[in-house]
Every structure is written in structure tokens, then in C-alpha cells.
Image: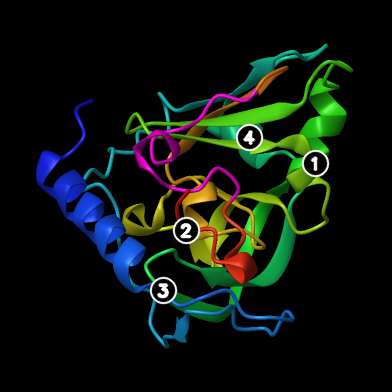
Amino acid sequence: MEINEKMLRAKERLLEKFKQTAPRIASGKPRLPPGQHLVKGFPVLDLGIHPQFRPERWRFRVDGLVEAPLNLSWEEFRALPKTEQVSDFHCVTTWSKYDVRWSGVSFRTLVERVRPSPESSHLIQECDDGYTTNLPLDELRGDDILVAYELEGAPIPLEHGGPVRMIVPHLYAWKSAKFLTRLVFQDRDTRGFWEVRGYHNHADPWKEERFG
């Protein structure tokens, strides 16, 4: 599926603005990261593509350097143990939202099922709109890493990345990919969609790792 070029150009212009105006790194680690402002709503910012969700065709795969790959239908995915977490959400475009309630499958549950090989060091998120993003496995050890399918007790709307999206609360939200359909364990880093276009490879909000 082709990426919406108009939305891509707008995001690239926003990146250039960040390079010129982003505030400096602050000391300490307050709840609100430096350079961010709180919002009450939940803004929508994406590539302009919302893939249609067809439950009967949808599949979720977890594979790569693992002992027991998964290839799950929607029903099979929803049958996995469910967990809920409340976390803050930080967008690279400088807004943050406190206390967002997500429900879904703990990333730890998936790790236990697939048993990554000792050589695995990175995770690649692949999505139904062609988007990808990368993370070192060391960033995914926490209890709050979630493969979510509910937002505030209801199915995640398409505009917020439904039916399934990753939630990595301690990093900027572009590392929490929307429309998630596959997780790939591998022994090397592979930069994703925004990382190759100038976004930072790590994305720590408290260090303002917006680009690099």
C-alpha cells in the first residue's frame, strides 16, 4: 500500500521545524518530558492511511529468530491472556496525554510463547500500512509493554491504530506502531520508516531524542 505523499511531506516539514525550534534537554525526569505540552483530547497524526480491518482475514505473526513462531487469527490473538495498563503517551510532535488506559496482550506473554533465540537483539514492528519501526529488546523488558487492542475499554479506533497497536510508554509514540500485524525478532538493527528519514533511532522523550 502506498504511503500518502501529502502527509509524508507535511511530517518531513514538521521534522525540519523541530530541528530549528526544539528546546534543549532538561535535567531530571519530571512526569512531563521537556518540550511537551499536555492535551485533554487524543490528537490523530498519521500517514493518512487507515487500512480496513477484516477480522476474517486478519493475521498476527511473531517470528524471526524464535523457537516457536506464531501465526494467529483474530480469534486466536484475542484468546491470549489479557492485561490492562494505564500509562502516559508522548508524541514527537510535542503533545502528551496522561493516564491512557490500554488493554491487550503483554509483550512478555508473546516472548514466553515464541522463545526468542539467544542471538535475538532487536524487534522490528511491521504494520498493515507498510510502516515499520525498530527497537532493541533491552527497551522491551518492562511490565508496561503491550500489544493493545482496546483503548479506554473499547476496541481501538482505526484513527488510533486499531485493531492492534504496540504500546511502549517510555519512548516517543512513533515507536508504538499502529495497525500492527507482525513482530520480527532479529540479531541486528534495521531502521524503520521514520528512522531512515531523520528521526532518532532511540526516541527517549526525556532526552528529547526527536531526531539524530
Q: Which residue is mark 2?
A: 210
Q: Nearer the viewer, mark 4 or mark 3?
A: 3
Q: In the figure, residue 92 lies in which quadrant?
A: bottom left
- Per the image, the residue denoted by label 1 is 138
Q: Earlier in the sequence, mark 3 or mark 1?
A: 3
Q: Is residue 147 above or below residue 196?
A: below
Q: Amino acid at mark 3?
A: Thr
Residue occupying image coordinates x 52% and y 69%: 90
Q: Secondary structure at mark 1?
A: helix
Residue in front for this viewpoint, 196 or 6: 196
Q: Vertically, is 110 above or below 85? A: above
Type of residue at label 4? Answer: Phe
Image side of residue 69 versus residue 22, left or right: right
**Residue extent of the magenta highlight:** 189-202
Spatial CA span between label 3 and label 1: 25 Å
Q: Please tell me which of labels 3 and 2 falls first in the chain.
A: 3
Q: Which mark is residue 77?
A: 4
Q: Residue 56, how many percent across, how many down?
A: 42, 27
For badge 1, the amino acid type reads Asp
According to the picture, the residue beneath numbered tag 3 turns out to be 94
Sooner in the amino-acid sequence: mark 2 or mark 1:
1
Closer to the chain start, of discs 1 and 4, is 4
The one of 120 and 148 positioned closer to us in this rendering? 120
**Residue at position x 83%, y 27% in the image:** 113
> Could you tell which of marks 4 and 3 lies nearer the N-terminus?
4
